Image: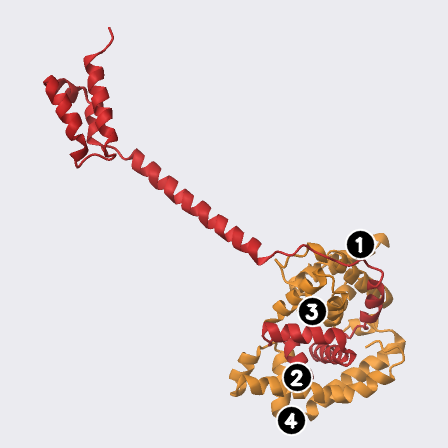
Chain colours: A orange, B red
Amino acid sequence: MADREVDQQLVERVQRGDKHAFDLLVTKYQRKLGRLISRFVRDPGDAQDVTQDSFIKAYRAMSGFRGESAFYTWLYRIGINTAKNHLLQNKRRPPTSTYFDAEDSESFEDASLLQEVSTPENELMSKQVVEVVQTSLQQLPEDLRSALTLREIEGLSYEEIASVMNCPVGTVRSRIFRAREAVAENLRPLLETSKDKRW
Amino acid sequence: MMKNKISALMDGELFTDEANHIIAQLKSQSSAQQDWQIYHLIGDVLRQPEVITADVSKVVHERLQFEPLVVAPQRSMTEKARNIALSAAASLMAVVAVSWMAMQATPNKSPQLALQTSPLSRASFVLEPQVNAYLAAHQELSPSSDVQGGSAFIRTTIYSATEDVAP
C-alpha cells in the first residue's frame, strides 16, 4: 500500500465517521502545512491559527473529497486559500512576487523563516530537537543511517533502497525502523520535559 | 513489532489488510499514537531542520470534538461494477448499430434492389406470367438473397407494380 493509499484509507475512515483517523492525518501533515502557511502568514501565532483553521475546514469538507487528487494536494490548496483569506481579512496583500504551487510545497526551503515561525520561548526547544535528531543520526551505524536518510531525505521506496544498499527489502524495513527507534529513544526524554508538549 | 509496523505504515510499505489493522491499533493505543507522532517529527526535522513549526494536533483534536461527524456516501463495489457493465453495454450497442448502418449503406449490396432501380433492367424483362410464380417459388434458394424468404415478396410486389401502373 503506497503512501497515498494510506492517506486514502485514513480519508475513507474519516468519511465513515472516524474522527481519530483525521488526527493521524493532522499529525502527519501539520508541519508540512505549517511551513506552507508560514510563507503567506508571517506572524507565527497567526500562522498556527491558520494551520488549525485549515485542518478544520478540511475536516468539514471531507465528505466532498473523492480521492481524485492526492489528499495532501487537496489539503495544501485549502491551506493556501485559508491563508489568503486571512490576509484579506486583515487587509494585507498575500505575497504575489512568487507563484507558489501546492504541488511544490514539500520542496519549500527558507532558512530565514526560523525566526519568523519560532517564538523566543520555543526557539531553544526547536534547536534542541534538531540537535538531538541530527546527533542521534550521526551516532547510528552506517547501514541504519543510510537507510533512514535514503527514505526520509531522498524519499526512496524500500525497494529502491534495497537496490541501492544491495540487501533484501525486509532488511531495509528493519534498518529504517531501528534507526527511527534509536533516534526516538534520545528524543523522548526531551519531549517529555517540554512544558507545553508542543512537539 | 507494533512499532516496526507503524514505521512501515508511514512509509506506505504495508499490505492493505496489515495497514488497516495497524490504523485500528493506532486508534486505541496512546503509545502507538506517540510513536506515530515522534516518527513523523523525526522525518520532518531531517527534511527541514530550519523550519520546525509547532504541534497543532492537540488543539485541532480538541476543536474536532465540537464538529459534527462527517459521513460521506460510500461508492460501493456494486455501483462501480454496474457503471462498468453499463459502459460495456453501451459500447457494444454502438458497435452493433454502426455495423448495421454500414451494411445498409453498402451500394449494390442487393442485386434485387439494383434491378428495381434500373429502368434498363426493368425494360429488358420480358417474362411470361407463369415465370412470376416460378421466381416467387424459388426466390429463397437464390444465393444473393440477403433476407431469405422476405425478398421474394418484395420482388413479386414490385414486379406486379410494373404491371399495374395507374394511369
Task: Compare marks 3 and 1 and give the one earlier in the sequence.
Answer: 1
> Subunit of mark 3?
A
As measured in the structure, the alpha-carbon distance from the residue carrying label 1 to the one carrying label 2 is 41 Å
In this rendering, would B73 be left or right of A158?
right
Q: Disc 3 residue type?
A: Phe
Q: Which callout, 1 or 4, points at the residue further toward the start of the chain?
A: 1
Q: Are marks 3 and 4 on the same chain?
A: yes
Cα gap from disc 4 to disc 2, whole angstroms = 18 Å
Rendered residue at 50%/53% (across/down): B84
Residue B165 visible somewhere in the drawing: yes
Q: Which residue is mark 1?
A: A85
Task: State if disc 1 and disc 3 touch (CB < 8 Å).
Answer: no
Residue located beneath label 4 in the image: A141
Answer above or below: position of B36 versus B65.
below
* Dots 3 and 1 on the same chain: yes
Q: Report the chain holding disc 1.
A: A
Q: Quadrant of residue A62?
A: bottom right
Q: Amino acid at mark 1?
A: Asn
For the point 71% across and 71% down, which residue is it? A109
Eye-nearest disc, 3 or 1: 1
Q: Would residue A193 be found to the left or right of residue A181 on screen?
A: right
Q: CA distance from mark 2 to mark 3?
A: 30 Å
Under circle 4, the secondary element is: loop
Within 10 angstroms of label 4, few (less than 14), some, or many (20 or more) residues? few
Tell me if label 3 and label 4 are in contact, CB under 8 Å: no
Question: What element does badge 2 sit on?
Answer: helix
How much space separates mark 3 and mark 1, taking CA atoms?
21 Å
Q: Disc 2 marks which residue?
A: B4
Please, what secondary structure does the residue beneath circle 1 have?
Answer: helix
